Amino acid sequence: MQNKISRRAIVKGGLVAGAMIPAFGLFAETASAAGLPPLDPADPTAKALGFVTDATKVDAGANPTYKATQKCSTCAQYLGKAGDASAGCNIFAGHSVPAGGWCKVWAQKPGA
Ligand code: SF4
């Protein structure tokens, strides 16, 4: 009986495993975003960061750096894809935020 594992088998197994990792990551992110409760604007942290569910309602006087193009879907912290109505946010872990929301932490998503 020969228990040697060929180099070809190792390379083949590594390629299959490597191909599966991004797929598992995609499923995990999609599942977690879908199951997250929406962030309540009355949440103390959300309040402190001026979170609103509708970026068009941002108090521009109180937030002079705000621009009309800023919203969660164009923020670097937003975990959703283009077209998602809501998704997770790195700042508010455990909650989802609407694509059209906004808070003071907004920062331009590269390429958005
Ligand atoms: S950090 Fe970005 S994605 Fe998160 S709530 Fe604020 S603006 Fe939206």
Image (cartoon, grey):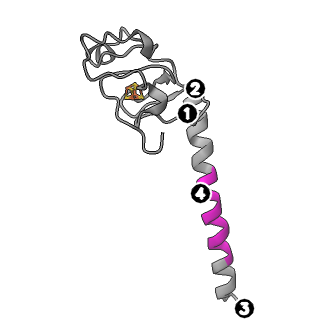
Amino acid type, mark 1 = Ser
Circle on res. 2:
3
The count of marks equals: 4
Circle on res. 32:
1
Residue underneath mark 4:
21
How crowded pointer 3 is (Cα within 10 Å; few <14, some 14-19, many 20+) is rated as few
Mark 3 vs mark 4: in front: 4
Closest to the observer, 83 or 35: 83
Closest to the observer, 50 or 8: 50
Image quarter for ligand 1: top left
Left/right placement of residue 15 relative to residue 86 reads: right
How crowded pointer 1 is (Cα within 10 Å; few <14, some 14-19, many 20+) is rated as some
Local SS, label 4: helix
* Residue 73 percent across, percent down from the top left: 49, 30
Q: Quadrant of residue 69?
A: top left
Circle nearer the N terminus (1, 3): 3
Bounds of the magenta segment:
12-23
Q: CA distance from mark 4 to mark 2?
A: 21 Å
